[in-house]
Image: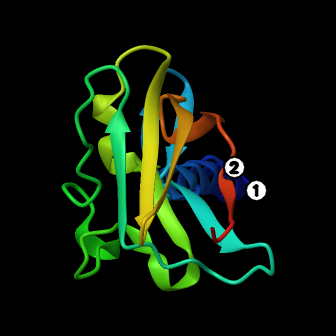
Amino acid sequence: MSAFKFYIPLLSITVLLAVLSSCDTLIEDKVCTAQFEIIGMSVTTSDGNPVVLDEFSVKNTRSGKTIDLCESDSSMCGESGIHGNPDFGLYTIYHDGLRSKIFGPVLGVLAEGRKGDQTFQRLFAIGDDGCHVYLAAGEPELIWEEK
């Protein structure tokens, strides 16, 4: 029976280490996962077909500067330099690689797109929960109406 008492704490420590090793970081009593969050928006026609934009950019509303979404995550940047999957009408607004650029509770960003002569602008608020970015405000689905 004494050997059994030895294995219970050892097993408990092993399980705890396994759980913690599946996580990226421990921040202020919060366990952060290694998941890479991407906040995106979709641009589709009223029929649900994807809209492939000629240009898409995101600006910091405080500074007015364009945010380089490919800077810290080039894995989803195509030849066009657009972060996301434009062939499916999906465009990145923000991602975890840019968490360090959020100063304060939220960051205002302006998404701008162009297809031909037609353009759009949409405002979003991006938050940081200490582990990942999240969409605090803004409508991530845009229905493109040809004019």
In this picture, is 77 found above or below 79? above
Q: State the quadrant of the C terminus.
A: bottom right
User: What percent of the width, then of the height, locates residue 2?
Assistant: 68, 51
Question: Mark 2 belongs to which amino acid?
Answer: Lys
Disc number for residue 20: none
User: Is residue 34 at least partly visible in the picture?
Assistant: no
Question: What secondary structure is marked by label 1?
Answer: loop
User: What percent of the width, then of the height, locates residue 45?
Assistant: 71, 75
The 10 Å Cα crowd at callout 1, few under 14, some 14 to 19, many 20 or more, is few
Question: Which marked residue is nearer to the observer: mark 2 or mark 1?
Answer: 2
In this picture, is 136 found above or below 139? above
Can you name the residue that lies furthest to the top here? Answer: 104
Question: Mark 1 belongs to which amino acid?
Answer: Met
Residue topped by disc 1: 1
Could you tell me which residue is drawn at 43 percent across and 70 percent down? 84
Q: CA distance from mark 2 to mark 1?
A: 7 Å
Could you tell me which residue is drawn at 65 percent across and 52 percent down? 140
Residue contact at pointers 2 and 1, CB within 8 angstroms: yes
User: What percent of the width, then of the height, locates residue 128?
Assistant: 49, 30
User: Is residue 141 at least partly visible in the picture?
Assistant: yes
Can you name the residue that lies furthest to the left here? Answer: 71
Disc number for residue 5: 2
Which of the two residues, 70 or 146, is positioned nearer the viewer here? 146
Q: State the quadrant of the N terminus.
A: bottom right
